[in-house]
Structure formats: structure tokens, C-alpha cells
Image: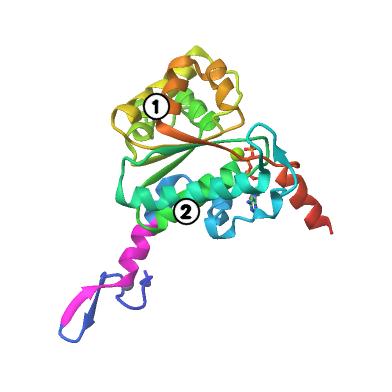
Amino acid sequence: MKPVCEFCGDSGLILKGEVAVPCGCIRQKAMTKLFKASGLPRKLLDCTLSSFDFKYYARNCLDIEKGVSYYEIAKLSFQAARNFVSKFMQDPNADGLLLSGPVGSGKTFLACGIANALLKKGKVVLFIVVPDLLDQIRSTYDTARNNSDYTEYDLVDTARKVPLLILDDLGAHNYTEWSRNKIFSIINYRLNHCLPIIVTTNITPEDLDEYLGERTTSRLLEMCRPYRLLVDMDIRAIQRKEKDQ
Ligand SMILES: Nc1ncnc2c1ncn2[C@@H]1O[C@H](COP(=O)(O)OP(=O)(O)OP(=O)(O)O)[C@@H](O)[C@H]1O
Ligand SMILES: [Mg+2]
Ligand SMILES: [Zn+2]
């Protein structure tokens, strides 16, 4: 097989004068591995903090309760995301974030911006779409569908212990008691071990307990700083219009 790296011929070492030093491809390979292991879908690799666009957040729409504009809220949330990245680099036990807001308000985008930034810095991140995780766990019970690559314990245990967990779309689904217990066990473990979580959800923090139960909600609010992204129009709809023009 032809070597992939033209500099080291895949030996991982290059000669600098008389000494052998690690080739740059080692870092690249490690990074590729991290990105693969993160579970971040392809499309979301483009959601970076530097491409977060503020034009979707109206300056003239006010969150009545707080008296701040949607634009200002987006700025604050973005700043919180950036701060999280730099904090986490120094402190693996930094407080997480709870990003709530309506459909198409940029919650997943912002969470992926954090994931991408940290993966590039060599951190281990796991991105989980909550309904998919629950399906996956369920399918490990179903022997006909189970490809036995992993067990329920593996899945839940990885989510419990990974340095940074992103729970995407912890939304307004009809959680069964079983699902709630799985989510609780992940969140409770992370709380006890001071491991941060970034959550995105359509549910307002006040209504979370209705869906997740009091014990999980209380823990999430303890672990995560809440930010509520607001938009006057679904960003997906705006982008569809932009494309048509
Ligand atoms: N600030 C932004 N700048 C550029 N594109 C954005 C921004 N926010 C969102 N988008 C794009 O808009 C679409 C919807 O964003 P996103 O998936 O983050 O929404 P969401 O709040 O997670 O919605 P849902 O509740 O449906 O999961 C995506 O295609 C995303 O790439
Ligand atoms: Mg989303
Ligand atoms: Zn090389």
C-alpha cells in the first residue's frame, strides 16, 4: 500500500539533521481520530464559532422579561460559548451550558461550535443526539437488531465518563420512565464527578421538570448556566429563502 504521508512514509518520524522528530501527521491523525470518535455528524463540522452569524438575531425584538434584544442575547450566549472553551482548556470541571430556545434558533450550531473548537485543541468530546442515544440503547436489548458491537453499558458508560458531553435535543419528547432513568443516570454521574455537559433543548428551563422529572432538572440547573437563544424567525426558513434568491 502506498504510504499516506509523503513526509514520513507513515513511520511517524522525520529526520531533522541527525535527530528523528515526530512528523506533523501524527497530530493530524490523532485529531482525525478525535473528530471521528466525537460522533459529530459531517454537516455539523462546519458549525464553528468563527462562522456563527449574528444577522439572524434581531436588534429590534426584545425579550420583554429581561429587556434585552435578541441580538444582545445571541452575543451573550456566544460569549458564554467562547468562555466555556477557554475555561474548559484550563479546568476540566468548568460549569456547562444549557442552551434553550425555539426551533431553528442556533442552539445546535453553538454547541457544535464549542465541540469543534475543543476537538481542534485535542480534547475528547462526545456529541449525542438524545433521541438517537435512547434508540441505540434500546436496540442493544433487541437481539435481532443488535450487531453486538457494543452493549447498553458501553454506551451509557461512555456518555457518563467522557470529558465533555454534548446532549443535543434533550427536547420535548415523550420520555418513558425508562428513558428518564437512563438520562438521569448519565447526568447524575457527571454531576458527582464534576464533568461538564452542554445541553440543547426546546424546553424552557421552567418546564424541564415536566419532561425530565424534578431530580434530573434540579441537577442540570446546578451544572449548567442557562442561555435562551431567541429568534423572530426559524433560521432554517431564512436560509431556505436566502438560497432561493
Ligand atoms: N448563528 C448562526 N449562523 C449561521 N447559521 C446558523 C446560525 N444558527 C443556526 N444556523 C443554521 O440554521 C440551521 C438551524 O440551526 P440549529 O440546528 O442550530 O437550530 P436549533 O436551535 O438547534 O433547532 P432545533 O430546535 O430544531 O434543533 C442550521 O442549518 C444551522 O447551520
Ligand atoms: Mg438542534
Ligand atoms: Zn508523516
Of residues 37 and 120, the one nearer the viewer is: 120
Closer-to-camera residue (146/116): 116
Left or right: 121 as drawn, with respect to 110: left
Q: Residue at 48% x, 31% y: name it.
A: 133
Name the spot of residue 116 as percent of width and height, x first: 47, 53
Q: Earlier in the sequence, mark 1 or mark 2?
A: 2
Residue at screen point 55% across, 22% down:
208
Point out residue 65 in the picture as x, y percentages from the top left corner: 65, 31
Magenta residues, dominant SS class: helix
Q: State the extent of the magenta-drawn residues as a range.
A: 19-32
Amino acid bearing label 1? Ile
In-front residue for pair 57/9: 57
Which residue corresponds to mark 2? Answer: 116
Vertical order, 16 against 127 (above or below): below
Q: Residue at x 69, y 48 (%)?
A: 57
User: Where is residue 187, by image quadrant?
Assistant: top left
Let me know if residue 141 appears in the view: no
Q: Quadrant of the C terminus?
A: bottom right
**Residue 232 drawn in magenta:** no
Q: Where does label 1 land, which residue?
A: 187
Q: 182 left or right of 192?
A: right
